[in-house]
Image: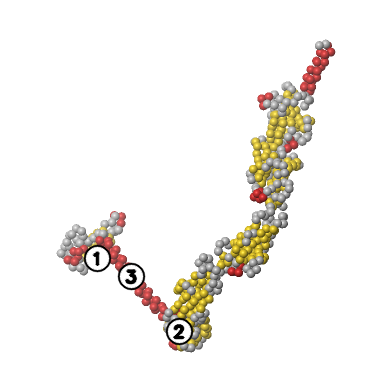
Amino acid sequence: MDLPGLLCAFLLVVCCCCRRATGVPGEAEQPTPEMVEVEVGNTALLRCGPSHSLSNLSHVDWFSVYKEKPTLIFRVRQGQGQSEPGEYQHRLSLQGPGALALTQVMPHDERIFLCQSKRPWFQEHRIQLRVFKAPEEPTIQTSALGISVNSKEPEEVATCIGRNGYPIPQVIWYKNRLPLMEEKNRVHIQSSQIVESSGLYTLKSVLKVQLVKEDKDAQFYCELSYRLPSGNHMKESREVTVPVFYPAEKVWLEVEPAGMLKEGDRVEIRCLADGNPTPPFSIHKQNPSTREMEEERSTDNGLLVLEPAQKQHSGLYECQGLDLETTIPLLSEPQELLVNYVSDVDVSPAAPAGQEGSSLTLTCKAESNQALEFQWLREKTGQVLEKGPVLHFDHLKREIGGGYRCVASVPSVPGLNRTQLVNVAIFGPPWMASKKRKVWVKENTMLNLSCEASGHPRPTISWNINGTASEEYQDSQRVLSTLNVLVTPELLERGAECTASNSLGRNSTIIILELEKKLPEQESKGVVIVAVIVCILVLAVLGAILYFLYKKGKLLCGRSGKQEITLPPSHKSEFVVEVKSDKLPEEMGLLQGSSGDKRAPGDQGEKYIDLRH
């Protein structure tokens, strides 16, 4: 190489060394920067190289590189730090030799930070700061109008929005827990994002799908996938369904309640279809005379209510619908409606009557579309007298008179029955509920006296005393008369009498009035009797106890007729109970103790029991 060539090579080496010595950032070959990750709002620690090489750094300059343009933001001289004016002036602090803390990290802090050290030697280090922020819970909103399956292209199903995330999260759509992918003319996902003033992103994703009838119950939701320094994460929206419109293919009738119907029921006839929306319906019933289907008065949604249902409602019904989108008429299969019934019950004779001793036959008739059963019941007691339509009396008595009810029922249809009540009248003079009775009264008080009589013809009642009388007819044969009177000495002396009469005779009831002052005397006698009985029972129990103690050896008699009952020393006292007996010596021998000793001749039968306690 000649001299000019050597000179050029020397000058090139000197320029390179000078350029490195001057430390102009960004002009030398740039190594891969160190990666530092931090969440929005946290503090990022920036180190100017490996930890072991930071202790000797006393002269460091920190740069923020944005769009390949470095800007000085911090200086370190002799271990002292100083922020440069600008956006980082109040958020940077020195964290030891060669380390810098950046507080309140924001999305636009995502950039390269460069540090240069010139003493004791030249050193340069690049740091790539990555910023993250989890988005809020995603919200989802479905199409309010619904989607028709007859649409020629994908329609908007739902919109998913994820707010305030960084960087932009990824959205994934699901149908029935299976992910949806882009599919030509079937599935289209359109996403966009907005940068908020904070630097965070709001993501909006619109799902468009070509739906079919089977999607009427499909569950759609969206998922946001994002990354944080701690790893990958995801958030899901709620599941939603979309109104899917499809034409009806079938129309049918439903009747409620199901099963056997009877007169008096509330019956609903409803039209149904497998389309959405439900087409307008009309309900038609066959005219039994012309055999033509005639429209019934029903609601637009195809509901006919029969309340109460009657036998004339039985017949053939059908639904007619019209699909508004295809304008195709729809017709259901005809359905037979049967309302079971029992006609009014007819009893003959309608007003049965007879003389005492004669016979009487009652016959019950009714009609039904089902097999009938008949029963005869006594109205007063509810007792079943006869099973069948005929009730016969061989020998009429006065007691037979009264109400009888015929019940016509359908066993196969629970609750379906009709009844008819008739009153059997027995010809005869009045019959009194009682011939004589006593009433306890108080003097100078108002008193209600009652008198009841029956007979055929129905009797009338009169009183032998003055007062306010009223009559109440119990049935076609019985009458109840009530008399309101003042209790006076004359009334007490005279008493009261009511007389019932009809065309066949008369009868009466005598009412004896007694003052209530006699009641305490009767009660006192009862109390005395009860007291005597109680005393006898107490004495009997006491005698039984004494006998039991004697048998158990608890009551012992000594040879001298005196017996000491020994108790513990702490309970002894000087009480002595003397019991005298008039029994002869030979009789007292029965009361000797278990030792068998005989009483001395001078012992006169006195017994002493020493009780010390």
Q: Is residue 388 among what the camera can see?
A: yes
Distance from disc 2 to disc 3, alpha carbons, whole Å, reads 61 Å
Q: Earlier in the sequence, mark 2 or mark 3?
A: 2
Q: Is residue 118 left or right of residue 430?
A: right
Distance from disc 1 to disc 2, alpha carbons, whole Å, reads 84 Å
Q: Is residue 420 left or right of residue 544?
A: right
Pointers 3 and 1 in contact (C-beta within 8 Å): no
Of helix, strand and loop, which one carries label 2?
Answer: strand
Q: Quadrant of the N terminus?
A: top right
Of helix, strand and loop, which one carries label 3?
Answer: helix
Q: Residue at x 73, y 26 (%)?
A: 31
Q: Is residue 204 left or right of residue 611?
A: right
> Most extreme residue toward the top, as rendered?
2
Q: Which residue is mark 2?
A: 355
Q: Which residue is mark 1?
A: 579
Q: Residue at x 69, y 39 (%)?
A: 170
Of helix, strand and loop, which one carries label 1?
Answer: strand
